Image (cartoon, grey):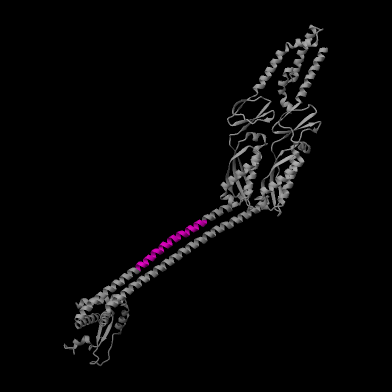
């Protein structure tokens, strides 16, 4: 293998010896060379049979250096032209010189490296690649979750990427899967599903980076985005119902709070109403008492000035008032002697109506005021 | 004729020299490891030949190249049993590289296939042992690192001694349950969610009842306190009124009795429904009979 790759290269060290075995179709070249040599020797032989072979040779070589030089120049030119190549702005070139990797990377632009001696591997070091994964996995509490993630990465060490690992991308994919499963496998499902997304991404990234560093991939993981974390389809419904239940919980509490918000102010209003009613009653009875007391006190003063007259007047006025409105039967007991027939129906009505005068204070008030007005 | 023979000889010599020259060196790529064999015998030391340009004897010396990069051996998923006899489907991979090309060549004839097969056997065995010693949750969770580290060390030791291979890492890509177990897990997950949902709803109702009861209690207390305050206020009013009455009426007790009585008479007969049966000889009627009142 190696000398097939390198067979052209030996032209430089050996070309001055006239070896022209370099070109691809060796047979052709040999035949040409052979013909030339024979021609040369033939002529040489014919020219001076007594001369030495070296002499003949020398005579023949007088023609051949031009040819040789031409061939060599063409070969070198072709060789040199194949050494040119171009690198994109995104690319860097890793140079293997005689198999040894060179520290210095080739920059974008037009470059030249001696073909065959140098082998150049192109590596894209600026593009941010992404690879996505979606899989179901076990959590620490033996539940199954479904995780979709995207890894964004970049080749930052071109030499490592080329030299130290075969299939760096496959390695990254394997490492991603392993890191993700490890992190999810060390977490409880609830943590993973609820608050875990950010943390999950970070710890997967950290772990993934440590793996790819270990494999010397020269890859830097820029970001691990957890697109979605959720229960697998088989249990999706039950999970949704839990969310609904949480909503229900909040709703029930809100409804109760609303009821409380209604009940308590209403109760406070009622309470205030009760108290205001009581205040009204208090003020009323006090005022009434004061009024009645004042009235009595004033009347008392007049009574004390003329007790007999006042008392009689009051008494007669009162009886007048009574007698005026009620049915009366006068029986002179001493003079009369007979049996008396009373109108019973009137008596009955009277007793029934007697129940009406219950509000003593107001009733007496009214009648007393009548009494007094009449008295004045 | 002599000359043409000489020509042929020269050509043959040149060709042979060229061929020998080509076979007198070799180049080792940075990505490869090489060992030099002389008549089939390994001449290189354990490191193998370094990257770069090397001379060798033509014909007698042969060079074997091996990939020196980190290689991946991806095992097919395998079923293992944990210590509590639960089945797990484990898919793992091994990262390895040729460390001792000489040993590697003698042990595997330099064939990656062979090395992979050896590795796979070892990994399967190692995983079986490691997983068989642990319970399921240990395999899935916290001890995964430890498990893998042990396995890596074990494997590395065995492989470097016998095959010249360094095992860099053994990782588990997937640890899954077999389908039939997965179904059971889904059932369990469903039932757990059901419980959770019920808990949330019950808790909602609980808290709602608590809030409502508290509101009711507050309402009753507020009303009762208002009643208490109202009664106190009424009492104050009654007391104050009573005192006012007492102060006024106490000035002349007899007159008060009279005053109050006649007021009462008026009130009692106010409705006019009563029938009075009277003796005309009473004080009121005394002038009815005579102007002197006797």
Left or right: residue A9 compared with residue A91? right
Whether residue B165 is visible here, answered yes or no, is yes
Quadrant location, the C terminus of chain A: bottom left
- The spot of residue A163 in percent (x, y) is 67, 34
Measuring 56% from the left and 54% from the top, which residue is drawn there? A242
Examine the image and state in which quarter residue A148 appears.
top right
Residue A256 lies in the magenta-colored region: yes
Which residue is most to the right?
B2
Prevailing secondary structure of the magenta residues: helix
User: Which residue is depicted at the point 80% across and 27% down?
Assistant: B59
Q: Going 52% across and 56% down the picture, which residue do you hit?
A: A248
The picture places residue A44, in percent across and down from the top left corner, at 78, 9
Percent x, y for residue B119?
Answer: 74, 42
- Which is more toward the observer, B277 or B159? B159
Q: Tell me where residue A329 sits by quadrant.
A: bottom left
Above or below, A282 against B79 in this view is: below
Total marks in image: 0
- Which residue shows up at 66% across the image and 46% down it? B174
Part of the protein shown in magenta: A248-277
Foreground pick, A36 / B49: B49
Can residue B272 be seen here? The reply is no
């Amino acid at each position: 293998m190696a000398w097939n790759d390198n067979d052209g290269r030996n032209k430089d060290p050996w070309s001055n010896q006239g070896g022209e075995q370099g070109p691809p179709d060796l047979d052709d070249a040999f035949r040409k060379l052979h013909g030339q040599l024979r021609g040369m020797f033939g002529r040489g032989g014919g020219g001076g049979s007594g001369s030495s072979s070296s002499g003949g040779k020398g005579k023949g070589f007088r023609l051949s250096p031009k040819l040789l030089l031409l061939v060599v120049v063409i070969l070198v030119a072709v060789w040199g032209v194949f050494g040119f190549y171009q690198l994109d702005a995104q690319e860097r070139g890793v140079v293997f010189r005689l198999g040894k990797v060179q520290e210095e990377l080739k920059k974008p632009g037009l470059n030249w490296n001696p073909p065959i001696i140098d082998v150049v591997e192109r590596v894209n070091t600026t593009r941010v690649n992404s690879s996505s994964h979606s899989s179901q996995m076990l959590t620490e509490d033996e539940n199954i979750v479904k995780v979709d993630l995207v890894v964004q990465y970049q080749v930052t060490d071109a030499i490592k990427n080329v030299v130290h690992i075969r299939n760096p991308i496959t390695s990254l994919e394997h490492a991603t899967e392993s890191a993700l499963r490890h992190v999810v496998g060390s977490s409880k499902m609830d943590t993973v599903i609820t608050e875990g997304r950010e943390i999950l991404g970070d710890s997967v990234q950290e772990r993934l980076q440590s793996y790819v560093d270990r494999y010397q991939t020269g890859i830097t993981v820029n970001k691990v985005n957890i697109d979605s974390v959720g229960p697998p389809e088989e249990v999706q419904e039950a999970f949704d119902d839990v969310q609904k239940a949480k909503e229900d919980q909040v709703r029930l509490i809100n409804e109760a709070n609303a009821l409380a918000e209604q009940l308590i102010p209403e109760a406070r209003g009622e309470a205030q109403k009760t108290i205001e009613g009581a205040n009204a009653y208090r003020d009323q009875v006090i005022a009434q008492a004061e009024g009645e007391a004042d009235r009595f006190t004033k009347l008392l003063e007049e009574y004390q000035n003329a007790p007999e007259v006042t008392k009689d007047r009051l008494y007669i006025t009162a009886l007048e008032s009574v007698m005026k409105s009620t049915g009366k039967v006068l029986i002179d007991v001493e003079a009369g002697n007979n049996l008396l027939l009373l109108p019973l129906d009137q008596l009955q009505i009277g007793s029934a109506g007697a129940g009406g005068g219950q509000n003593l204070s107001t009733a007496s008030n009214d009648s007393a005021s009548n009494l007094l007005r009449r008295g004045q | 004729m002599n000359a043409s023979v000489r020509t042929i000889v020269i050509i043959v010599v040149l060709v042979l020299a060229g061929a020998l020259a080509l076979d007198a060196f070799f180049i080792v790529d940075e990505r490869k490891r090489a060992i030099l064999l002389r008549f089939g015998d390994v001449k290189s030391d354990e490191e193998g030949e370094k990257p770069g340009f090397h001379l060798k004897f033509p014909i007698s010396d042969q060079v074997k190249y091996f990939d020196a990069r980190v290689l991946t051996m991806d095992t097919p998923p395998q079923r293992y049993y944990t210590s509590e006899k639960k089945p797990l489907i484990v898919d793992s991979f091994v990262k390895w590289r040729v460390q001792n090309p000489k040993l590697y060549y003698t042990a595997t004839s330099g064939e990656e296939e062979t090395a992979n097969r050896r590795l796979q056997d070892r990994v399967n065995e190692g995983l079986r042992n490691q997983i068989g010693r642990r319970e399921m949750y240990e395999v899935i969770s916290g001890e995964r690192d430890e498990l893998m580290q042990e396995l890596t060390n074990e494997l590395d030791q065995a492989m470097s001694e016998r095959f010249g291979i360094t095992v860099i890492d053994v990782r588990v890509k997937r640890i899954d349950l077999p389908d039939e177990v997965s179904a059971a897990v889904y059932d369990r997950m469903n039932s757990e969610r059901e419980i959770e949902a019920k808990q949330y709803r019950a808790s909602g109702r609980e808290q709602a009842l608590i809030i409502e009861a508290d509101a009711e209690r507050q309402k009753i207390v507020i009303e009762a306190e208002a009643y208490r305050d109202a009664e106190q206020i009424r009492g104050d009013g009654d007391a104050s009124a009573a005192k006012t009455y007492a102060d006024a009426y106490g000035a002349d007790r007899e007159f008060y009795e009279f005053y109050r009585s006649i007021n009462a008479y008026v009130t009692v007969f106010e409705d006019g429904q009563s029938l009075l049966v009277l003796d005309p000889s009473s004080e009121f009627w005394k002038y009815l009979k005579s102007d002197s009142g006797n």
